[in-house]
Image (cartoon, rainbow, N blue to C red):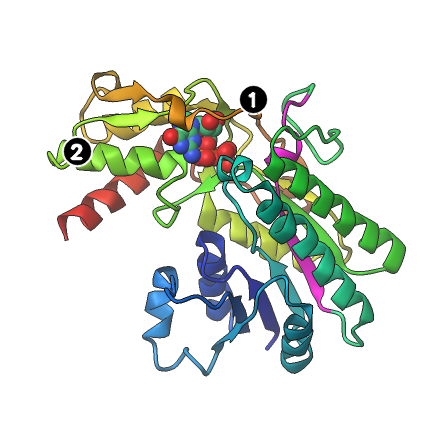
Amino acid sequence: MPTALITGITGQDGSYLTELLINKGYTVHGIVRRSSITARGRLDQLFHRDDVYNKQLFLHYADLGDSTTIRRILIKCLPDELYHLAGQSHVGASFDIPETTCDFTAMGTLRLLEILRDLEKQPRFLHISSSEIFGRPDHWPQNETTPMNPVTPYGIAKAFATQMVALYRESFGLFACNAICYNHESPRRGESFVTRKITRAAAAISMGKQKTLSLGSLDGQRDWGFAPEYVDAMWRMLQQPQADDFVIATGTAHSVKDFLSASFAAVDLDWTDYVQQDPRYMRPSEGTRLVGDPSKASKQLQWDAQTKVPELAKIMVQSDLARLSD
Ligand code: GDP
């Protein structure tokens, strides 16, 4: 059976991808950053399975800045597929820590590509790119040929990484792909992203555990899909005969207000009674109406998003209700 290596294995997507690959019979290696607090909650279920942990699933410590260690792990594991999901993924935070964001997200990807270039056995490589590369696009929906126009440090770092992946594919013959993913959410989404912040608040307010919800701009529109489906698209990309880039999206734009409305409706509340705007959560600059055209993925990967807002909001609110009542 094939072997996969995942950077960012402890994140939302890393954990869903690990489950998918383990179920397909892969051996999975994950790279984790060494820190005093180990945030591995999302992988807990797999860690507690004696038939999986250290038999089919292995973890290795390395920082994306530590090329020597990453090279050593690659030579030791000899993966058939490498999924590069790690990075500083919060757009708002990228304004506070732009250097870290560019170091992890842009340079981290380039360093990996450089290591792959020298390997005798080169794995198929998937880089998770982002709709943030389009920033303020001049047409809707965006597809694989839409010009990049990023307007955030995160978007700029991702645009650099995305172009490097395409360059290494074209110039050095690497099997390297960009999954240009639009926002994808789940009960495992970090609590500082707007969807999870909203579903957690809707659940907490309905249980009397929270009174109000403070948000930034409500004007942005995003194309929100369900994360487990997006990691399936990533896997499909690496099974293609040729490396290529794909937009992974639902094709439908929703405003933050739509997501609020769907989430509070799931607990029979009206969001306008609880939400207040707080300048602390406003961004200096922001992507506008980001909505993807997934027709290439639909045609070539036979992949279509199944779960959309408001069902997505309902799944997340229900999970938060269960978590808060534990
Ligand atoms: P992003 O698309 O990767 O930036 O995903 P986020 O979930 O962080 O933000 C989605 C949209 O929600 C953006 O337009 C944000 O400006 C908006 N937003 C409004 N209030 C908040 C907030 O309190 N936190 C976050 N993270 N986003 C907010």
Q: Position of residue 69 (x, y in %)?
A: 64, 74
Mark nearer the viewer, 1 or 2: 2
Residue drawn where x is 64% and y is 67% of the image: 66
Viewed as shown, does residue 8 lie left or right of 267?
A: right
Q: Position of residue 16 (x, y in %)?
A: 45, 57
Q: Identify the residue position indicated by label 2 in the image.
A: 210
What amino acid type should be assigned to the residue bearing mark 2?
A: Gln
**Ligand 1 position by quadrant:** top left
Vertical arrangement, residue 52 with respect to residue 314, above or below: below
Question: Residue 133 lies in magenta, yes or no?
Answer: yes
Q: Which residues are magenta?
A: 123-137
Q: Position of residue 325 (x, y in %)?
A: 13, 48
Q: Position of residue 182 (x, y in %)?
A: 55, 37
Vertical arrangement, residue 317 with respect to residue 6, above or below: above
Residue drawn where x is 45% and y is 61% of the image: 10
- Is residue 26 visible in the rendered structure shown here? no
Disc 2: CA contacts within 10 A as few (<14), some (14-19) or many (>=20): some
Q: Identify the residue position indicated by label 1 in the image.
A: 289
Viewed as shown, does residue 78 lie left or right of 225?
A: right
Please tell me in which quadrant of the rendered image residue 81 appears: bottom right
